[in-house]
Image: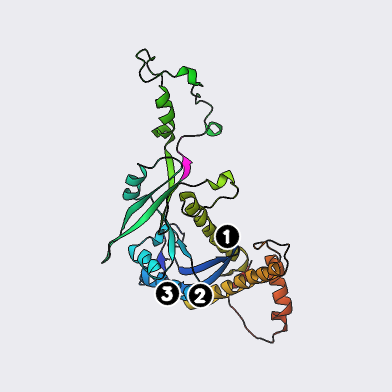
Amino acid sequence: MKSDPPVGVHKQSHLDTGHAWKELQGTIKINGRVFIIASLSYLPPNDQFQGVRYILDRARELVNIDTVMADAEFVDTKICRYVRQCGCDYAIRKGATDAVKDTVEGFRGRADWDSNWTLSSSGRRRTHNTTLVGLEKDFKSAPDHKKKDDEEDEPDTTLDDFGDDEEEDVVEGQLTLDQAIEEPHKDKEEIDYFCIITSKSVDRAGIDPDENPIGHDPEGSAWGIGRLYRDRWGIETAFRDKKGTFAAKTRSRDLGYRRFLWMMENLLYNGWVMLNSTVSDQSPDRDDDEIVVKQGTYLDELDRRVLSGLSLDLEFPDVEYG
């Protein structure tokens, strides 16, 4: 028997139920730790820009913001303009649209950028000038260790095998030296770029973080933008921690009740992060982002020292933890 979906849900075809509730959430990263700073129940009639503006305004009331980072879902001229109006920079993932594909066709090397790129959106303010940064994500050609057994490796060559451009007796099919230099940029090893739009100034490629350089300044470089955006991955870790440990599992279809449990989950998570941050601050020999108190230990102690001492007669239907 097919039932009507609950009120306030979004269509999500990839889920078994075909729909889901959505929460727009703002997080901050301080000393390597992720804190949840603002949250908004995102209903289908909501305007995305208004929701983002609420989250950003709420966050600015509590902390000083340097750079706003977000997924490609939030690429919009109005959002970018408002972030800049607030005196902040932004670094937002940009998907492979036709305009992006056309631009990255001219990119060279493992990191490149276009400082005069135009972002287009629907609405009154349809365009916004920004910088598009492209960083190597992967090579489309398969590396040697991933090649199938029936694939033959290309024959090895040395500089002696290549003639000069001006030589007329170059063997057919043999590369010249100049062609060999340009060969890595051919289609068979076309670079797949991870793209980010940013309001920050970019004037050089910089140094790949994977090379583990010592004493360099990433400011103003394409790789520096990528290094900055990598901080956003801590948000994904926070969601995983909440879902695995702090989330209350329920089958209730009541949006208000589910939102209450969601906010409790956020408070429990923030309390755990704050506890670890405080302990680390009091211990100079510990790293800022070190996990000192485990999640299970934190919840057990919270139950033993706080909840067990309260004379509350509360019942939450259909709720499980862990």
Which residue is labeled 1 in the image? 237
Q: Dominant secondary structure of the magenta stretch? A: strand
* Residue 19 visible from this viewpoint: no
Residue 159: say if magenta: no
| Comparing labels 3 and 1, the label whose residue is closer to the camera | 3
SS label for mark 2? helix
Q: Nearer the viewer, residue 155 or 180?
A: 180
Q: Residue at x 44, y 32 (%)?
A: 184
Q: Residues within 10 Å of mark 1 (few under 14, many from 20)?
A: few
The kind of residue tagged 3 is: Tyr
Question: Splitting the image into 4 quarters, where does residue 124 fall?
Answer: bottom left
**Residue 79 coordinates in the image, percent (x, y):** 37, 66
Q: Residue at x 37, y 64 (%)?
A: 80
Is 252 situated above or below 94? below
Q: Nearer the viewer, residue 256 or 185?
A: 185
Q: Measure the C-alpha gap from mark 2 to mark 1.
A: 21 Å
Q: Nearer the viewer, residue 253 or 214?
A: 214
Specify start and end residues of the magenta stretch as a single range.
Answer: 136-141
**Residue 104 coordinates in the image, percent (x, y):** 37, 45
Which residue is labeled 2 in the image? 259
Is tag 2's residue or tag 3's residue first in the polypeptide sequence?
Answer: 3
Which residue is labeled 3 in the image? 54
SS label for mark 3? helix
Numbered badge on residue 98: none
Q: Quadrant of the N terminus?
A: bottom left
Most extreme residue toward the top is 169
Q: Measure the C-alpha gap from mark 2 to mark 3.
A: 18 Å
